[in-house]
Amino acid sequence: MKCIEEPAKKIPVCMEADVFVAGGSCTGVFAAVRAARLGAKVVLVERENCLGGTATAGLVNIWHSLKDTDYKNQVIAGLTYEMTERLVKSGSARLDDNPSTAINFDPNRLKYELDRLVEEEKIKVYLHTLCVGVITDGNEITAALIENKDGRSAVKAGFYIDATGDGDIMKYLGVKSYTGSPMQPPTPCYLMQGSLENIDYKSIIVEHGNEVGLPDDFGWSEPVTGLPGIYLRADFHIFGVDCSTADGLTLTEIEGRRKAYAFVELINKYAGTDLKIVALNSLAGVRETRHYETKQQACGRDMLLGKRYEDAVLNGTYRIDVHDEDACVTFYYLNGETVRMKGGISSNYIYGNWRKDEGITGEPAKYYQMPFSVLVQEKYRNIIAAGRMINADKMAYGALRVMVNLNQIGEAAGVAAYLSVNSGKPVWDIDGKEVRALLVKGGSAL
Ligand SMILES: Cc1cc2nc3c(=O)[nH]c(=O)nc-3n(C[C@H](O)[C@H](O)[C@H](O)COP(=O)(O)OP(=O)(O)OC[C@H]3O[C@@H](n4cnc5c(N)ncnc54)[C@H](O)[C@@H]3O)c2cc1C
Protein backbone atom coordinates (compact mmCIF):
# COMPACT_ATOMS: atom_id res chain seq x y z
CA MET A 1 0.00 0.00 0.00
CA LYS A 2 1.27 3.51 -0.87
CA CYS A 3 2.23 5.48 2.28
CA ILE A 4 2.83 9.10 3.23
CA GLU A 5 4.68 10.38 6.30
CA GLU A 6 2.70 12.20 9.02
CA PRO A 7 4.88 14.94 10.57
CA ALA A 8 5.49 14.51 14.33
CA LYS A 9 3.48 16.96 16.45
CA LYS A 10 2.81 17.77 20.09
CA ILE A 11 -0.44 16.27 21.40
CA PRO A 12 -2.22 17.97 24.34
CA VAL A 13 -2.95 15.76 27.37
CA CYS A 14 -6.67 16.34 27.96
CA MET A 15 -6.98 14.16 31.08
CA GLU A 16 -4.90 12.23 33.59
CA ALA A 17 -6.59 9.36 35.38
CA ASP A 18 -6.06 6.04 37.13
CA VAL A 19 -8.01 4.02 34.59
CA PHE A 20 -8.77 4.67 30.91
CA VAL A 21 -11.59 2.67 29.27
CA ALA A 22 -12.00 2.57 25.47
CA GLY A 23 -15.52 1.51 24.42
CA GLY A 24 -18.71 2.26 26.31
CA SER A 25 -20.94 -0.80 25.93
CA CYS A 26 -22.14 -2.21 29.26
CA THR A 27 -18.85 -4.14 29.33
CA GLY A 28 -16.87 -0.88 29.32
CA VAL A 29 -19.27 1.06 31.53
CA PHE A 30 -19.43 -1.70 34.14
CA ALA A 31 -15.61 -1.92 34.14
CA ALA A 32 -15.46 1.84 34.69
CA VAL A 33 -18.07 1.75 37.47
CA ARG A 34 -16.37 -1.10 39.34
CA ALA A 35 -13.01 0.73 39.26
CA ALA A 36 -14.63 4.05 40.25
CA ARG A 37 -16.49 2.48 43.18
CA LEU A 38 -13.15 1.24 44.52
CA GLY A 39 -11.84 4.81 44.41
CA ALA A 40 -10.17 5.04 40.97
CA LYS A 41 -10.40 8.16 38.80
CA VAL A 42 -11.79 6.88 35.51
CA VAL A 43 -12.08 8.22 31.93
CA LEU A 44 -14.21 6.42 29.34
CA VAL A 45 -14.37 7.15 25.59
CA GLU A 46 -17.08 5.92 23.24
CA ARG A 47 -17.24 6.45 19.47
CA GLU A 48 -21.09 6.47 19.28
CA ASN A 49 -23.46 9.14 20.64
CA CYS A 50 -24.51 6.93 23.55
CA LEU A 51 -23.33 4.29 25.99
CA GLY A 52 -24.48 0.68 25.74
CA GLY A 53 -22.92 -0.57 22.47
CA THR A 54 -24.81 -3.49 20.96
CA ALA A 55 -27.55 -3.25 23.63
CA THR A 56 -28.44 0.34 22.70
CA ALA A 57 -26.91 1.51 19.41
CA GLY A 58 -27.28 -2.08 18.16
CA LEU A 59 -30.86 -2.38 19.57
CA VAL A 60 -30.31 -5.92 20.96
CA ASN A 61 -32.71 -5.76 23.92
CA ILE A 62 -32.36 -9.12 25.69
CA TRP A 63 -30.27 -10.11 28.68
CA HIS A 64 -30.43 -13.79 29.48
CA SER A 65 -31.25 -15.41 32.79
CA LEU A 66 -29.40 -14.49 35.99
CA LYS A 67 -30.45 -17.79 37.57
CA ASP A 68 -29.11 -21.34 37.42
CA THR A 69 -30.62 -23.88 35.03
CA ASP A 70 -33.19 -24.93 37.67
CA TYR A 71 -34.30 -21.34 37.60
CA LYS A 72 -34.17 -21.37 41.41
CA ASN A 73 -30.91 -19.75 42.56
CA GLN A 74 -29.57 -16.46 41.25
CA VAL A 75 -25.96 -17.00 40.09
CA ILE A 76 -25.33 -13.62 38.42
CA ALA A 77 -25.76 -10.34 40.28
CA GLY A 78 -23.67 -7.17 40.18
CA LEU A 79 -24.27 -4.31 37.80
CA THR A 80 -26.44 -6.35 35.40
CA TYR A 81 -28.83 -6.90 38.28
CA GLU A 82 -28.61 -3.27 39.46
CA MET A 83 -29.28 -1.98 35.96
CA THR A 84 -32.18 -4.41 35.50
CA GLU A 85 -33.74 -3.11 38.72
CA ARG A 86 -33.42 0.47 37.46
CA LEU A 87 -35.01 -0.44 34.13
CA VAL A 88 -37.84 -2.40 35.76
CA LYS A 89 -38.55 0.53 38.11
CA SER A 90 -39.04 2.85 35.15
CA GLY A 91 -41.34 0.36 33.39
CA SER A 92 -38.71 -0.20 30.69
CA ALA A 93 -37.85 -3.84 31.41
CA ARG A 94 -39.72 -6.96 32.32
CA LEU A 95 -38.48 -10.23 33.76
CA ASP A 96 -39.83 -13.63 32.83
CA ASP A 97 -39.05 -17.27 33.47
CA ASN A 98 -37.75 -18.02 29.99
CA PRO A 99 -33.96 -18.47 30.29
CA SER A 100 -33.43 -17.10 26.77
CA THR A 101 -35.47 -13.95 27.09
CA ALA A 102 -35.35 -13.45 30.86
CA ILE A 103 -34.76 -9.68 30.79
CA ASN A 104 -36.38 -7.71 27.98
CA PHE A 105 -35.70 -3.95 27.97
CA ASP A 106 -36.18 -0.77 25.98
CA PRO A 107 -32.75 0.12 24.51
CA ASN A 108 -33.59 3.85 24.59
CA ARG A 109 -34.11 3.80 28.33
CA LEU A 110 -30.90 1.82 28.81
CA LYS A 111 -29.01 4.70 27.14
CA TYR A 112 -30.58 7.10 29.64
CA GLU A 113 -29.90 4.90 32.68
CA LEU A 114 -26.25 4.40 31.67
CA ASP A 115 -25.84 8.20 31.40
CA ARG A 116 -27.19 8.52 34.96
CA LEU A 117 -24.95 5.71 36.24
CA VAL A 118 -21.67 7.21 34.96
CA GLU A 119 -22.76 10.62 36.23
CA GLU A 120 -23.41 9.20 39.72
CA GLU A 121 -20.03 7.47 39.76
CA LYS A 122 -18.25 10.67 38.59
CA ILE A 123 -16.72 8.95 35.57
CA LYS A 124 -15.45 11.37 32.92
CA VAL A 125 -17.07 10.35 29.62
CA TYR A 126 -16.29 11.54 26.10
CA LEU A 127 -18.90 10.50 23.50
CA HIS A 128 -18.27 10.73 19.74
CA THR A 129 -14.67 9.94 20.64
CA LEU A 130 -12.50 7.28 19.07
CA CYS A 131 -9.42 5.76 20.67
CA VAL A 132 -6.97 5.80 17.77
CA GLY A 133 -3.73 4.59 19.30
CA VAL A 134 -1.53 4.21 22.34
CA ILE A 135 1.98 5.34 23.32
CA THR A 136 4.19 2.78 25.03
CA ASP A 137 7.44 2.75 26.95
CA GLY A 138 8.84 -0.77 27.06
CA ASN A 139 6.06 -3.04 28.28
CA GLU A 140 4.02 -0.17 29.71
CA ILE A 141 1.30 1.91 28.06
CA THR A 142 1.85 5.56 28.96
CA ALA A 143 -1.00 7.27 27.06
CA ALA A 144 -4.02 6.61 24.89
CA LEU A 145 -4.57 8.77 21.82
CA ILE A 146 -8.13 9.90 21.20
CA GLU A 147 -9.87 11.94 18.49
CA ASN A 148 -13.08 13.94 18.74
CA LYS A 149 -14.43 17.41 17.96
CA ASP A 150 -11.53 18.91 19.94
CA GLY A 151 -9.05 17.21 17.61
CA ARG A 152 -6.41 14.72 18.66
CA SER A 153 -5.40 14.55 22.32
CA ALA A 154 -3.96 12.10 24.85
CA VAL A 155 -5.21 10.56 28.09
CA LYS A 156 -2.54 9.43 30.53
CA ALA A 157 -3.59 6.66 32.88
CA GLY A 158 -2.14 4.02 35.16
CA PHE A 159 -4.19 1.22 33.58
CA TYR A 160 -6.06 0.75 30.28
CA ILE A 161 -9.15 -1.33 29.55
CA ASP A 162 -9.86 -2.22 25.93
CA ALA A 163 -13.64 -2.67 25.71
CA THR A 164 -13.91 -1.88 22.01
CA GLY A 165 -15.41 -5.25 21.05
CA ASP A 166 -12.87 -5.80 18.27
CA GLY A 167 -9.92 -5.16 20.62
CA ASP A 168 -8.65 -2.04 18.84
CA ILE A 169 -6.01 -1.23 21.49
CA MET A 170 -4.75 -4.80 21.49
CA LYS A 171 -4.37 -4.46 17.73
CA TYR A 172 -2.45 -1.16 18.06
CA LEU A 173 -0.17 -2.96 20.56
CA GLY A 174 0.39 -5.93 18.27
CA VAL A 175 -0.85 -8.50 20.79
CA LYS A 176 -1.13 -11.85 18.99
CA SER A 177 -4.63 -12.35 17.62
CA TYR A 178 -6.72 -14.91 15.77
CA THR A 179 -10.20 -14.96 14.23
CA GLY A 180 -12.99 -17.46 14.68
CA SER A 181 -13.11 -20.04 11.92
CA PRO A 182 -15.52 -19.23 10.51
CA MET A 183 -16.39 -15.98 12.30
CA GLN A 184 -19.99 -15.85 13.52
CA PRO A 185 -21.72 -13.49 11.04
CA PRO A 186 -23.20 -10.08 11.99
CA THR A 187 -26.93 -9.24 12.09
CA PRO A 188 -28.09 -5.64 11.72
CA CYS A 189 -31.23 -5.03 13.80
CA TYR A 190 -34.20 -2.66 13.58
CA LEU A 191 -37.40 -1.81 15.43
CA MET A 192 -40.62 -2.50 13.59
CA GLN A 193 -44.14 -1.33 14.30
CA GLY A 194 -46.64 -4.15 13.81
CA SER A 195 -46.71 -7.82 14.66
CA LEU A 196 -46.00 -10.83 12.44
CA GLU A 197 -47.77 -13.12 14.89
CA ASN A 198 -50.54 -14.31 12.56
CA ILE A 199 -48.61 -14.03 9.32
CA ASP A 200 -46.81 -16.90 7.61
CA TYR A 201 -43.90 -14.60 6.77
CA LYS A 202 -41.44 -17.50 6.57
CA SER A 203 -43.25 -18.89 3.51
CA ILE A 204 -43.28 -15.43 1.94
CA ILE A 205 -39.49 -15.18 2.31
CA VAL A 206 -38.91 -18.71 1.03
CA GLU A 207 -41.24 -18.21 -1.99
CA HIS A 208 -40.55 -14.58 -2.88
CA GLY A 209 -37.29 -13.60 -1.12
CA ASN A 210 -35.38 -13.90 -4.42
CA GLU A 211 -37.34 -10.94 -5.86
CA VAL A 212 -35.59 -8.60 -3.41
CA GLY A 213 -32.34 -10.44 -2.74
CA LEU A 214 -33.37 -11.96 0.58
CA PRO A 215 -31.88 -15.41 1.09
CA ASP A 216 -33.50 -18.09 3.24
CA ASP A 217 -31.91 -17.25 6.60
CA PHE A 218 -32.43 -17.72 10.31
CA GLY A 219 -33.63 -14.83 12.49
CA TRP A 220 -35.56 -13.89 15.59
CA SER A 221 -37.72 -11.14 17.03
CA GLU A 222 -38.79 -9.86 20.45
CA PRO A 223 -41.25 -7.24 21.66
CA VAL A 224 -39.80 -4.15 23.35
CA THR A 225 -40.93 -3.61 26.93
CA GLY A 226 -42.78 -0.33 27.42
CA LEU A 227 -43.31 0.26 23.68
CA PRO A 228 -46.53 -1.59 22.76
CA GLY A 229 -46.68 -2.77 19.15
CA ILE A 230 -42.93 -2.32 18.63
CA TYR A 231 -40.70 -5.34 17.94
CA LEU A 232 -36.97 -5.80 17.72
CA ARG A 233 -36.25 -7.66 14.48
CA ALA A 234 -33.01 -9.59 13.91
CA ASP A 235 -34.07 -11.35 10.72
CA PHE A 236 -30.95 -12.01 8.72
CA HIS A 237 -27.18 -12.27 8.72
CA ILE A 238 -24.61 -10.62 6.48
CA PHE A 239 -22.32 -13.45 5.45
CA GLY A 240 -18.65 -13.42 4.53
CA VAL A 241 -17.69 -10.04 6.06
CA ASP A 242 -15.07 -9.07 8.65
CA CYS A 243 -16.58 -6.24 10.69
CA SER A 244 -13.21 -5.29 12.15
CA THR A 245 -12.29 -3.83 8.76
CA ALA A 246 -13.57 -0.51 7.35
CA ASP A 247 -14.97 -2.17 4.23
CA GLY A 248 -16.57 -5.06 6.13
CA LEU A 249 -18.33 -2.81 8.63
CA THR A 250 -19.50 -0.38 5.94
CA LEU A 251 -20.90 -3.18 3.80
CA THR A 252 -22.67 -4.71 6.82
CA GLU A 253 -24.39 -1.43 7.72
CA ILE A 254 -25.52 -0.65 4.15
CA GLU A 255 -26.56 -4.20 3.27
CA GLY A 256 -28.32 -4.46 6.65
CA ARG A 257 -30.49 -1.42 5.95
CA ARG A 258 -31.24 -2.72 2.46
CA LYS A 259 -32.31 -6.11 3.78
CA ALA A 260 -34.44 -4.56 6.54
CA TYR A 261 -36.51 -2.53 4.05
CA ALA A 262 -36.62 -5.41 1.56
CA PHE A 263 -37.99 -7.70 4.31
CA VAL A 264 -40.69 -5.31 5.52
CA GLU A 265 -41.79 -4.25 2.02
CA LEU A 266 -41.98 -7.88 0.84
CA ILE A 267 -44.21 -8.86 3.78
CA ASN A 268 -46.43 -5.80 3.23
CA LYS A 269 -46.75 -6.71 -0.47
CA TYR A 270 -47.73 -10.37 0.01
CA ALA A 271 -49.52 -10.24 3.39
CA GLY A 272 -51.34 -6.93 2.84
CA THR A 273 -49.93 -5.55 6.10
CA ASP A 274 -48.79 -2.02 6.93
CA LEU A 275 -45.63 -2.82 8.88
CA LYS A 276 -43.25 0.10 9.41
CA ILE A 277 -39.61 0.38 10.35
CA VAL A 278 -39.46 2.90 13.22
CA ALA A 279 -35.74 2.72 14.06
CA LEU A 280 -32.62 1.30 12.42
CA ASN A 281 -29.57 0.40 14.48
CA SER A 282 -26.78 2.96 14.45
CA LEU A 283 -24.27 0.15 15.06
CA ALA A 284 -24.63 -3.20 13.30
CA GLY A 285 -24.83 -6.21 15.61
CA VAL A 286 -21.34 -7.70 15.30
CA ARG A 287 -21.12 -11.25 16.66
CA GLU A 288 -17.43 -11.93 16.25
CA THR A 289 -14.19 -10.52 14.88
CA ARG A 290 -10.72 -10.88 16.42
CA HIS A 291 -9.66 -12.62 19.64
CA TYR A 292 -6.41 -11.99 21.54
CA GLU A 293 -4.10 -14.47 23.18
CA THR A 294 -3.98 -14.53 26.97
CA LYS A 295 -2.63 -16.86 29.68
CA GLN A 296 -5.48 -19.31 29.16
CA GLN A 297 -8.13 -19.89 26.50
CA ALA A 298 -11.70 -20.40 27.75
CA CYS A 299 -12.68 -23.99 26.98
CA GLY A 300 -16.27 -24.83 25.99
CA ARG A 301 -16.02 -28.42 27.13
CA ASP A 302 -14.89 -27.37 30.63
CA MET A 303 -17.81 -24.96 30.75
CA LEU A 304 -20.33 -27.59 29.71
CA LEU A 305 -18.94 -29.94 32.35
CA GLY A 306 -19.27 -27.19 34.97
CA LYS A 307 -15.58 -26.95 35.93
CA ARG A 308 -15.11 -24.74 39.02
CA TYR A 309 -12.28 -22.22 39.67
CA GLU A 310 -11.04 -20.47 42.82
CA ASP A 311 -10.53 -17.34 40.74
CA ALA A 312 -13.87 -17.52 38.90
CA VAL A 313 -14.97 -14.07 37.78
CA LEU A 314 -18.04 -15.20 35.88
CA ASN A 315 -21.01 -17.49 36.41
CA GLY A 316 -23.19 -18.26 33.43
CA THR A 317 -26.09 -20.37 32.28
CA TYR A 318 -26.73 -19.17 28.74
CA ARG A 319 -26.40 -22.11 26.35
CA ILE A 320 -23.58 -22.39 23.84
CA ASP A 321 -25.03 -20.67 20.76
CA VAL A 322 -23.07 -20.82 17.50
CA HIS A 323 -24.25 -19.10 14.29
CA ASP A 324 -22.53 -20.48 11.23
CA GLU A 325 -21.82 -19.07 7.80
CA ASP A 326 -24.37 -21.42 6.20
CA ALA A 327 -27.37 -20.03 8.17
CA CYS A 328 -27.21 -22.91 10.66
CA VAL A 329 -27.47 -22.27 14.38
CA THR A 330 -26.43 -24.85 16.97
CA PHE A 331 -27.23 -24.83 20.70
CA TYR A 332 -25.54 -26.97 23.37
CA TYR A 333 -27.13 -27.03 26.82
CA LEU A 334 -25.61 -27.90 30.19
CA ASN A 335 -28.18 -30.70 30.62
CA GLY A 336 -26.89 -32.42 27.48
CA GLU A 337 -29.46 -31.35 24.91
CA THR A 338 -28.29 -30.14 21.52
CA VAL A 339 -30.43 -28.46 18.89
CA ARG A 340 -29.24 -27.72 15.37
CA MET A 341 -31.38 -25.49 13.20
CA LYS A 342 -30.43 -26.19 9.63
CA GLY A 343 -31.78 -24.63 6.50
CA GLY A 344 -32.51 -20.99 7.31
CA ILE A 345 -35.91 -19.52 7.98
CA SER A 346 -37.70 -22.81 7.27
CA SER A 347 -35.28 -24.68 9.54
CA ASN A 348 -35.17 -28.40 10.13
CA TYR A 349 -34.59 -28.97 13.81
CA ILE A 350 -32.12 -31.76 14.58
CA TYR A 351 -32.12 -32.83 18.23
CA GLY A 352 -29.37 -34.68 20.08
CA ASN A 353 -27.68 -35.11 23.45
CA TRP A 354 -23.92 -34.54 23.83
CA ARG A 355 -23.81 -36.09 27.33
CA LYS A 356 -25.43 -39.32 26.12
CA ASP A 357 -23.18 -39.39 23.05
CA GLU A 358 -20.11 -39.13 25.30
CA GLY A 359 -21.46 -41.52 27.94
CA ILE A 360 -21.39 -38.85 30.66
CA THR A 361 -23.48 -39.73 33.70
CA GLY A 362 -24.27 -37.97 36.98
CA GLU A 363 -25.88 -34.62 37.68
CA PRO A 364 -25.27 -31.99 35.01
CA ALA A 365 -23.86 -28.64 36.18
CA LYS A 366 -26.44 -25.92 36.84
CA TYR A 367 -24.10 -23.13 35.73
CA TYR A 368 -20.60 -22.70 34.29
CA GLN A 369 -17.66 -20.51 35.31
CA MET A 370 -14.72 -18.71 33.75
CA PRO A 371 -11.38 -18.06 35.54
CA PHE A 372 -9.65 -14.67 35.70
CA SER A 373 -6.56 -15.93 33.81
CA VAL A 374 -8.60 -15.99 30.56
CA LEU A 375 -8.44 -12.16 30.67
CA VAL A 376 -4.72 -11.80 31.33
CA GLN A 377 -2.39 -11.05 28.41
CA GLU A 378 1.31 -11.16 29.20
CA LYS A 379 2.85 -8.58 26.87
CA TYR A 380 1.91 -5.22 28.41
CA ARG A 381 1.77 -4.73 32.18
CA ASN A 382 -1.18 -2.33 32.35
CA ILE A 383 -3.97 -3.43 30.03
CA ILE A 384 -6.89 -5.87 29.98
CA ALA A 385 -9.23 -6.51 27.06
CA ALA A 386 -12.84 -7.10 28.11
CA GLY A 387 -15.58 -8.04 25.66
CA ARG A 388 -16.19 -10.17 22.62
CA MET A 389 -12.47 -10.18 21.73
CA ILE A 390 -12.11 -12.73 24.56
CA ASN A 391 -9.71 -15.66 24.20
CA ALA A 392 -12.14 -18.55 23.80
CA ASP A 393 -12.52 -21.66 21.70
CA LYS A 394 -15.49 -21.84 19.33
CA MET A 395 -17.82 -23.50 21.85
CA ALA A 396 -16.82 -21.32 24.81
CA TYR A 397 -17.18 -18.22 22.67
CA GLY A 398 -20.72 -19.28 21.73
CA ALA A 399 -21.70 -18.83 25.38
CA LEU A 400 -19.35 -16.12 26.67
CA ARG A 401 -20.25 -13.62 23.93
CA VAL A 402 -23.66 -12.80 25.43
CA MET A 403 -24.13 -9.68 27.50
CA VAL A 404 -24.86 -11.13 30.94
CA ASN A 405 -21.45 -12.79 30.63
CA LEU A 406 -19.52 -9.90 29.08
CA ASN A 407 -21.00 -7.53 31.67
CA GLN A 408 -19.38 -9.66 34.39
CA ILE A 409 -16.11 -9.73 32.46
CA GLY A 410 -16.22 -5.92 32.36
CA GLU A 411 -16.70 -5.80 36.12
CA ALA A 412 -13.73 -8.13 36.64
CA ALA A 413 -11.55 -5.96 34.37
CA GLY A 414 -12.50 -2.87 36.41
CA VAL A 415 -11.56 -4.55 39.69
CA ALA A 416 -8.26 -5.84 38.25
CA ALA A 417 -7.44 -2.35 36.94
CA TYR A 418 -7.96 -0.90 40.40
CA LEU A 419 -5.82 -3.62 42.01
CA SER A 420 -2.99 -3.03 39.53
CA VAL A 421 -3.02 0.76 39.98
CA ASN A 422 -3.25 0.44 43.74
CA SER A 423 -0.47 -2.12 44.12
CA GLY A 424 1.78 -1.15 41.20
CA LYS A 425 1.73 -4.81 40.13
CA PRO A 426 1.60 -5.80 36.46
CA VAL A 427 -1.65 -7.39 35.37
CA TRP A 428 -0.07 -10.87 35.26
CA ASP A 429 0.74 -10.65 38.99
CA ILE A 430 -2.79 -9.70 40.03
CA ASP A 431 -4.28 -12.53 42.07
CA GLY A 432 -7.52 -13.72 40.47
CA LYS A 433 -8.80 -14.81 43.88
CA GLU A 434 -8.43 -11.22 45.08
CA VAL A 435 -10.36 -10.01 42.03
CA ARG A 436 -13.09 -12.49 42.83
CA ALA A 437 -13.15 -11.47 46.50
CA LEU A 438 -13.57 -7.78 45.61
CA LEU A 439 -16.28 -8.64 43.09
CA VAL A 440 -18.14 -10.56 45.77
CA LYS A 441 -17.69 -7.70 48.24
CA GLY A 442 -19.00 -5.24 45.64
CA GLY A 443 -22.06 -7.43 45.03
CA SER A 444 -20.96 -8.84 41.68
CA ALA A 445 -19.83 -12.47 41.76
CA LEU A 446 -21.93 -14.87 43.81
C1 LIG B 1 -27.97 -9.70 16.31
C2 LIG B 1 -27.35 -10.07 17.59
C3 LIG B 1 -28.15 -10.58 18.57
C4 LIG B 1 -27.64 -10.86 19.81
N1 LIG B 1 -28.47 -11.29 20.76
C5 LIG B 1 -28.07 -11.29 22.02
C6 LIG B 1 -29.00 -11.43 23.07
O1 LIG B 1 -30.19 -11.61 22.85
N2 LIG B 1 -28.53 -11.34 24.34
C7 LIG B 1 -27.21 -11.16 24.60
O2 LIG B 1 -26.84 -11.07 25.77
N3 LIG B 1 -26.30 -11.07 23.63
C8 LIG B 1 -26.70 -11.09 22.34
N4 LIG B 1 -25.80 -10.92 21.34
C9 LIG B 1 -24.36 -10.84 21.65
C10 LIG B 1 -23.98 -9.54 22.34
O3 LIG B 1 -24.91 -8.54 22.06
C11 LIG B 1 -22.58 -9.05 21.96
O4 LIG B 1 -21.67 -10.11 21.90
C12 LIG B 1 -22.09 -8.09 23.02
O5 LIG B 1 -23.01 -7.03 23.16
C13 LIG B 1 -20.72 -7.55 22.67
O6 LIG B 1 -20.34 -6.65 23.68
P1 LIG B 1 -18.95 -5.92 23.66
O7 LIG B 1 -18.95 -5.00 24.82
O8 LIG B 1 -17.83 -6.87 23.56
O9 LIG B 1 -18.92 -5.14 22.29
P2 LIG B 1 -19.86 -4.03 21.66
O10 LIG B 1 -21.25 -4.11 22.15
O11 LIG B 1 -19.58 -4.12 20.20
O12 LIG B 1 -19.27 -2.68 22.25
C14 LIG B 1 -18.06 -2.11 21.86
C15 LIG B 1 -18.20 -0.62 22.11
O13 LIG B 1 -16.96 0.02 21.84
C16 LIG B 1 -17.15 1.14 20.98
N5 LIG B 1 -15.89 1.28 20.24
C17 LIG B 1 -15.41 0.42 19.33
N6 LIG B 1 -14.20 0.83 18.90
C18 LIG B 1 -13.91 1.96 19.60
C19 LIG B 1 -12.80 2.83 19.62
N7 LIG B 1 -11.70 2.58 18.89
N8 LIG B 1 -12.84 3.91 20.43
C20 LIG B 1 -13.95 4.17 21.19
N9 LIG B 1 -15.02 3.36 21.21
C21 LIG B 1 -15.01 2.27 20.43
C22 LIG B 1 -18.35 0.77 20.15
O14 LIG B 1 -18.98 1.89 19.62
C23 LIG B 1 -19.22 0.03 21.19
O15 LIG B 1 -20.03 0.89 21.92
C24 LIG B 1 -26.26 -10.67 20.07
C25 LIG B 1 -25.42 -10.19 19.08
C26 LIG B 1 -25.95 -9.90 17.85
C27 LIG B 1 -25.06 -9.37 16.80
Image: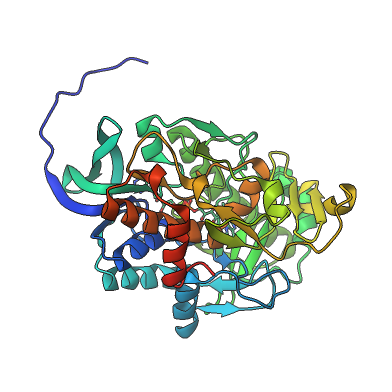
Identity of the residue drawn at 73% across and 39% down: 326
Any part of residue 289 in sight: yes
Q: Is 325 in front, or is 118?
A: 118
Q: Quadrant of the C terminus?
A: bottom right
Which quarter of the picture shows residue 35? bottom left
Q: How many dots with numbers? A: 0
Any part of residue 190 in sight: no
63 sits to left or right of 212: left
Q: Is 116 in front, or is 20?
A: 20
Percent position of residue 331, x then y: 74, 53
Task: State the colouring used for the structure image.
Answer: rainbow
210 sits to left or right of 54: right
Which quarter of the picture shows residue 416? bottom left
Percent position of residue 157, x then y: 23, 48
Q: Is 310 in front, or is 195?
A: 310
Which quarter of the picture shows residue 28? bottom left
Q: In this view, does 173 lie above or below 306?
A: above
Q: Is residue 175 above or below residue 368?
A: above
Q: In which quarter of the image is the N terminus?
A: top left
Identity of the residue drawn at 20% across and 46% down: 156
Q: Is 358 in front, or is 71?
A: 358
Q: Is residue 135 above or below residue 439?
A: above
Identity of the residue drawn at 59% across and 76% down: 229
Percent position of residue 266, x then y: 67, 55
125 sits to left or right of 397: left
Percent position of residue 60, x then y: 54, 61
392 sits to left or right of 21: right
